[in-house]
Image (tube, rainbow, N blue to C red):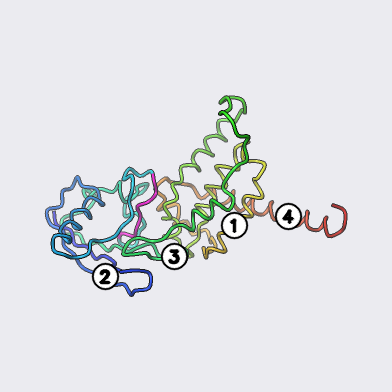
Amino acid sequence: MRIILHVWRQKDANSPGRMVRYEVNNVNPHMSFLEMLDVLNEELTLKGEEPIAFDHDCREGICGMCGFMINGRAHGPLEGTTVCQLHMRHFKDGDELWLEPYRARAFPVIRDLVVDRSALDRLIAAGGYISVNAGSAPEANSIPVPKPVAEKAMDAAACIGCGACVAQCPNASASLFLGAKVSHLGLLPQGQPERYERVLKMVTQAALEGFGHCTNIGECEAVCPKRIKLEVIARLNRDYLIATLKHIGVKETVEAGVG
């Protein structure tokens, strides 16, 4: 089948960008979307033109590397799917598609469809860890965890940090990502010692990176390839409120000369 692409081409972060039209003929319906771009890039290379830059790694929906906007939707029209898992059989012959990089202040464009998502790594570095004693792994059942709690934690841990939630949010908020990280660590017993310190540090870092505020529009949940639920944002807000009150309480106690 034949697919018409309008692709955002931008040499680097400081150069102006523009949409460029391409036609890809003889597209096999069984190709993944990235394989279709591979075919187009091979044609461009043979013509002596610059291939389209896009992020990818495992191509199995695990690493979170791939990701751009397809007709205004992060990862494309299919729910619960990354771009690398999206196949051309979900499109029709003659379809016209518009491909753009993620648009967010915290995700500057590097080239074409590639953006710098290292801001998410810095959020993790700010507080996304637990303190454990070094040594051999503990026996699996040494710390009992109720099954409902374990399931909620594992559901949140499914986040792959692709950044689709940020790109789709009108405010470019990272709250779904933050909520997932805070939830999967904060729900488990091992994550309790740093629970409230963690959320304060991560929310503070998010503000420094230029992410916007959540206004509960819900577009993040709609495009998340791992179907992370909005409830993680509620948990994030609750933990942040408690952490703020605890921090204020400690500060007032110290200032009063009691602590």
Q: Which residue is mark 4?
A: 247
Q: Which residue is mark 2?
A: 19
Q: Earlier in the sequence, mark 4 or mark 2?
A: 2
Q: Which residue is mark 1?
A: 203
The outermost residue toward the left is: 26
Mark 2 crowdedness (10 Å alpha carbons): few <14, some 14-19, many ≥20: some
Q: Which residue is mark 3?
A: 104
Provide the secondary structure element on which disc 1 rests.
Answer: helix
Distance from Cα at disc 2 to Cα at disc 1? 35 Å
Distance from Cα at disc 3 to Cα at disc 4? 31 Å
Q: Is residue 66 magenta?
A: yes
Residue type highlighted by circle 1: Val
Q: Provide residue 43's location: percent of width, then percent of height.
A: 15, 58
Q: Is residue 58 magenta?
A: no
92 or 26, nearer to the observer: 26
Q: Provide residue 187's location: percent of width, then percent of height.
A: 60, 40
Distance from Cα at disc 4 to Cα at disc 2? 49 Å
Mark 4 crowdedness (10 Å alpha carbons): few <14, some 14-19, many ≥20: some
Identify the residue at horizontal 39%, vertical 49% (top origin): 64
Residue type highlighted by circle 3: Ala
